Amino acid sequence: EWVVGQIVKQKLVGGDKTRYADFAVLYRGNHQARVFEEALRSARVPYQLSGGQSFFDKAEIKDVLAYIRLLANPSDDPAFLRAATTPKRGIGEATLGKLNAHAQQHGCSLYEAALSEEAQSALAAANREHLHQFIALMESYRARAEHDDAGGLINNLLGDIGYEAHLLNSEEGKAGEIKWRNVCDLTGWLAKKGEQDGKNIIEIAQTIALMTLLEGKNEEEADAVKLSTLHASKGLEYPYVFLVGCEEGMLPHADSIEESNVEEERRLMYVGITRAKRQLTLTHCIKRKRQGTWQFPEPSRFIDEMPQEDLKILGRKGGDPIVSKEEGRSNLAGLQAMLAAKAKKE
């Protein structure tokens, strides 16, 4: 959140001269990308990910988001198609084909077609019953969507459709468990967003809307923050680079330390450092939760190997705070002005 906050602030300060494409967030492993994707979407900042699959592009995440999109907008036909058929509930090609024909003829959405008695009458009895059950489910959750807390609602919905069982039964080995953990990460984030921002699932759906402004654009054209592994960043440069997770065990990686292969990790760090043309920011956690337990990592040894006169250390004991007093006063003044404006409006 701090990194994304810095990007937003520098973009505002730079105005038209600064583009989102001027910023890159680099990391050692693909698994580090998810929290940055979530933070960027929360701040409505466009981004592109390379060197791995986006968390939001995973099939199981798209499944859950299809239900959320359909709750927020029943006219979203792609969301209807995905939600109606995942998990399988007896709504097949024959049913969808007849709904589509009705929608085309009457210029309406698939959801509206599914509510139509005329369209329903064209279906076989069993197919009509399966469609009724799905629409009744969605209507009941639409009625709750604006009032129920986001986390509780989406967890109830996933329980009602048996999504965990669907994943465990349709995947081999531990793949289903891994996918369900991803879903739990998503629902946990949705619940946290709902509590922190006081938003219902409909409002959160707008926050996590797909970055449609990037569709149809290639990577060179898109004005978006780049998320990338260090390996995938070779040969590229950016005015502002955030090299995150600079901790012992992560960079250098724990496996490399055990195998006495730290030199290769040092070269990787050098790749990251030299991607920055104007400003390089290194970050490391004071504590990090891994596999359910808290860890307290040490800053990467590579930071101490850098020319100390070129570094400005923030947030460490005895050093300058991450947020200076001037920034703090400015942030407080902005907050007070916003509250005063809101009070006046009310």
Image (cartoon, rainbow, N blue to C red):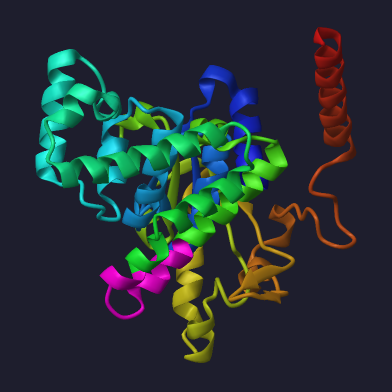
Q: Is residue 216 visible?
A: no
Q: Which region shows up in magenta? A: 168-182
Let me know if residue 177 is in the magenta part: yes
Magenta stretch, main secondary structure, is: helix
Q: Residue at x 26, y 35 (%)?
A: 78
Q: Position of residue 192 (x, y in %)?
A: 65, 49
Let me know if residue 196 is in the magenta part: no
Q: Residue at x 69, y 37 (%)?
A: 197
Q: Residue at x 27, y 77 (%)?
A: 172
The image quadrant where one finds the C terminus is top right
Q: Residue at x 49, y 28 (%)?
A: 19
The residue closer to the viewer here, 66 or 327, is 66
Q: Position of residue 152 (x, y in %)?
A: 60, 50
In this rendering, the count of numbered labels is 0
- In the picture provided, is 237 more to the left or to the right than 87? right
Q: Position of residue 41 (x, y in %)?
A: 52, 39
Q: Position of residue 104 (x, y in %)?
A: 14, 19
- In the picture provided, is 225 more to the left or to the right than 14? left
The residue closer to the viewer here, 246 or 171, is 171
Q: Is residue 246 visible?
A: yes
Residue placed furthest toward the bottom? 259
**Rendered view: 134 above or below 74:** below
The residue closer to the viewer here, 266 or 328, is 328
**Rendered view: 268 above or below 60:** below
Residue placed furthest toward the top? 345
- In the picture provided, is 183 more to the left or to the right than 11? left
